[in-house]
Amino acid sequence: MKPRREVKREDRRVFVQVVEGLLRHGVGERVTPRLRERLKQVGLDLDRPLLPAYPVTQWLYCLHIILEEVYPGLPREEGFRQLATDHVEGYGQTLVGRAMMRLLRLLGPKRTVQQMVQALRSGDNYTEVRLKELEPGMWEMWMNSVLDAPGYAEALFVGFLKASGASEPHAAIVRREEEGTVYLLRWKER
């Protein structure tokens, strides 16, 4: 797969299916009038049709607002993990997400990890991923982003692996770099 053209940080965008997956389906009825108003104040108006894309900085700010409003009593990392779990479930209810989730089940865990490059790219205009198989059921994945949302990416990856039928999936950060994050993805081989 050929690499994407480098996208400047200020031009990075998250596509509508990511926003729709979380807010319309993942959080759904838990979108309170207060959450709706707070999101509107930062430019995400749920009373209007969603935009085709949102700046990443705006979307990350929205994730923090959603965390505060939907999971107020949870420790930050646990809240982000729950938010990501809800996001995977919600994304699976979008048109693009339904097709992707069916495909993951057919592919199984190993091929799902290999296809994660494309899956992650479908949600934005900037994500780059590099994979290295360490042994059966264990992969190292580098992604060109560093999120201020502890546990969020890890829970997303676990959600994808679960959707693929992986047994005992796990994802953890190995290290953070200036321009990216290295994760370890693993599951129990059957």
Image (cartoon, rainbow, N blue to C red):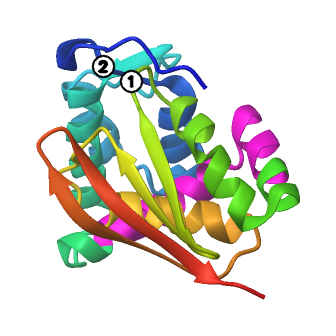
Query: Residue at image x 29%, y 67%?
Result: 173
Query: Residue at image x 69%, y 55%?
Result: 112
Instruction: Tell me, yes or no, if residue 34 can be seen here.
Output: yes
Query: Residue at image x 24%, y 72%?
Result: 77
Q: Residue furthest right?
A: 106
Residue 4: in magenta span: no
Q: Position of residue 7 (x, y in %)?
A: 30, 14
The part of the chain drawn in magenta is 79-102
Q: Which mark is residue 12?
A: 2
Quadrant occupied by the N terminus: top right
Q: Amino acid at mark 1?
A: Tyr
- Number of numbered tags placed on the structure image: 2
Classify 7 as above or below 160.
above
Q: Position of residue 101 (x, y in %)?
A: 76, 51
Residue 94: in magenta span: yes
Q: Residue furthest left?
A: 178
Quadrant occupied by the C terminus: bottom right
| Nearer to me, 128 or 43 | 128
Report the predominant secondary structure element of the magenta stretch.
Answer: helix
The answer to whether the residue labelled 1 contacts the one labelled 2, judged by CB atoms less than 8 Å apart, is yes
**What residue sits right under mark 1 in the picture?**
126
Within 10 Å of disc 1 (Cα), the crowding (few <14, some 14-19, many 20+) is many
Query: Residue at image x 62%, y 56%?
Result: 113
Work out how far the residue at label 1 is from the one at label 2, CA to CA, in angstroms: 6 Å
